[in-house]
Image: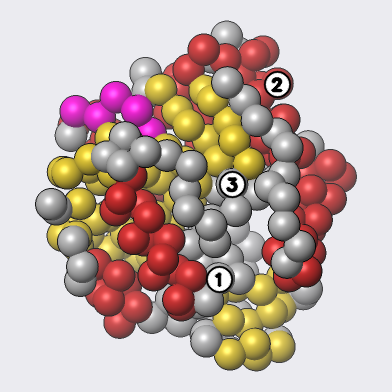
Amino acid sequence: MNSHEPPDGGDPAGTAHRDHWQSAYAAHPGMYGDEPSAPARYAAGLFREAGARDVLELGAGHGRDALHFARTGFSVRAADFSATGLAQLTAAAEARGLADRIATAVQDVREPLAAADGSADAVFAHMLMCMALSTAEIRALTAEVHRVLRPGGRFVFTVRHTGDAHYGTGRDLGDDIHEHGGFAVHFFSRALVEELAAEGWLLDDVTPFEEGELPRRLWRVTMTRVP
């Protein structure tokens, strides 16, 4: 079942963030292309080896990675701030015969995740954790992912880090958040990654990689939920 209605609420910053993505997806449908990201390919293999059957993707956008998970046999719950992006994902899933494998829902990740305790085999988030979220909000989101994952479930996420060329440039918003070209990013330190993994997780792997123009410098982080 799909739900494309934005959550109610009156936070101006949240509304501005959502409106940015709504406008971006409306102006550039499928703007990240059809090919899955390298982290999604890695995650699909890892999740399969761990025996996962379903994946919760946070920050799914227009769905290039959600579609990849579905094509490789997973049931997918795709969540994003943008109803426009999710509508594009739904249309793409229907066109590819994958609609029965993908459910979508608008989700503000600053709010509790709309999933039951221990209901997900695996969680994936490409570039979602390093959006304009405070450290407190990132901690709360990580705790929510821990809540919805079953014991032994894997969480794979990617973040831009403090070695990125844009770190320290543009408008400094504090809390390692910098706005460059009208877009704010929370740049992760290694200490923050280790802090997030300290409560209820095994930190399996932190792999550096590059993506896109500049290029952006990121970490691919893999963690396993422990009871």
Residue 34, can we see it? Answer: no
Query: Which residue is denoted by mark 1 in the rendering?
Result: 133
Q: Is residue 114 left or right of residue 51?
A: right
Residue 187, can we see it? yes
Q: Disc 3 marks which residue?
A: 107
Seen from the viewer's position, the closer of residues 201 and 91 is 201
| Residues tagged 1 and 2 counted as in contact (Cβ below 8 A) | no
Of marks 1 and 2, the one in the foreground: 1
Which three-letter amino acid code belongs to the residue tagged 2? Answer: Ala
Q: Is residue 183 magenta?
A: no
Left or right side of 105 for 193: left
Question: Is residue 12 depicted above or below 83 in this figure?
Answer: below
Mark 3 or mark 2, earlier in chain: 2
Relative depth, front residue between 65 and 125:
125
Q: Residues within 10 Å of mark 3 (few under 14, many from 20)?
A: many
Secondary element at tag 1 = loop
Q: Disc count in the image?
A: 3
- Which amino acid, by three-letter code, is at mark 3? Gln
Q: Residue at x 53, y 76 (%)?
A: 134
Q: Residue at x 84, y 50 (%)?
A: 23
Name the spot of residue 122 as percent of width and height, x first: 31, 39
Q: Position of residue 38 (x, y in %)?
A: 43, 45
Q: Are marks 3 and 2 in contact (CB under 8 Å)?
A: no
Question: From the viewer's perspective, is the residue at label 3 or at label 2 nearer?
Answer: 3
Residue 44 pos. (x, y %): 34, 34
Q: Residue at x 66, y 73 (%)?
A: 184
Q: Quadrant of residue 171?
A: bottom right
Looking at the picture, tell me which residue is in the foreground, 102 or 150. Answer: 150
Magenta residues span 51-55
Q: Report the predominant secondary structure element of the magenta stretch.
A: loop
Q: In the picture provided, is 225 more to the left or to the right than 165?
A: left
Amino acid at dot 1:
Leu
